[in-house]
Image: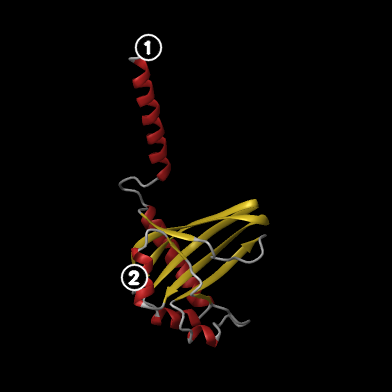
Amino acid sequence: MSKIFPSRRAFIAGLGATTALSACGNGIGSNGASKIDARVDSTRNFLFNKYPGTQRLAEKASGILFMPLITKAGLGVGGSYGRGALRIDNVTVDYYAALQANVGFQIGAQQYAHALFFMTPEALRSFRTSSGWSLGADAEYALNDNAGNLSAETLTALAPVIAVVFGQAGLILGATLEGTKYNRIIP
């Protein structure tokens, strides 16, 4: 029996590792990057067409993280998840996942998109070199007027990171990026 036990343990460990790796979906030859890039292109075009002021903001930014679809759900305990791409000069340089967990009075589900405009090279460098970055208090949320334009304060803001949340659909009121953790991924 002692000879069987180690092989049984190895089999179970191997099965667990195989299951975990297959769940990642990051296999060689995967088209995950092209799917994310296509969604980012669509999101970028929507953002710039719907809110023309974001184009001026993009011209000033050192880089932009586009998160095309964040899904948030909760019933007491909640969370959100999405994947996107960091672009510098409109070229994808890295892919990221956004993850948020929260506890509190909440019920419902919501989907939205967002973009983080890194307005200084230092803010962009801090984001890219971190091993898990969270949006801090030094970020500013862009506000849109009724005509879909960014407020003048947003365009002249000195914040190192400006967040634009848009395309909300669902039953949870509002969308906040507070507590969202961003990690580099290989799609």
Separation (CA) of disc 1 from disc 2: 56 Å
- Of mark 1 and mark 2, the one earlier in the sequence is 1
**x, y percentage for residue 150?**
54, 82
Kind of element beneath mark 2: helix
In the rendered view, tell whether residue 83 sits above or below residue 88.
above
Residue sitting at x 44%, y 67%: 66
Tell me the amino acid under the disc marked 2: Arg
Nearer to me, 181 or 73: 181
**x, y percentage for residue 130?**
37, 62
Picture disc at residue 36: none
Pointer 2 residue: 125
Answer left or right for 73 relative to 28: right
Nearer to me, 3 or 16: 3
Answer left or right for 12 relative to 143: left
Tell me the amino acid under the disc marked 1: Met
Circle 2 crowding by C-alpha within 10 Å: few under 14, some 14–19, many from 20: few
**x, y percentage for residue 110?**
61, 59
In the rendered view, tell whether residue 57 sits above or below residue 35.
below
Quadrant where the image shows the N terminus = top left
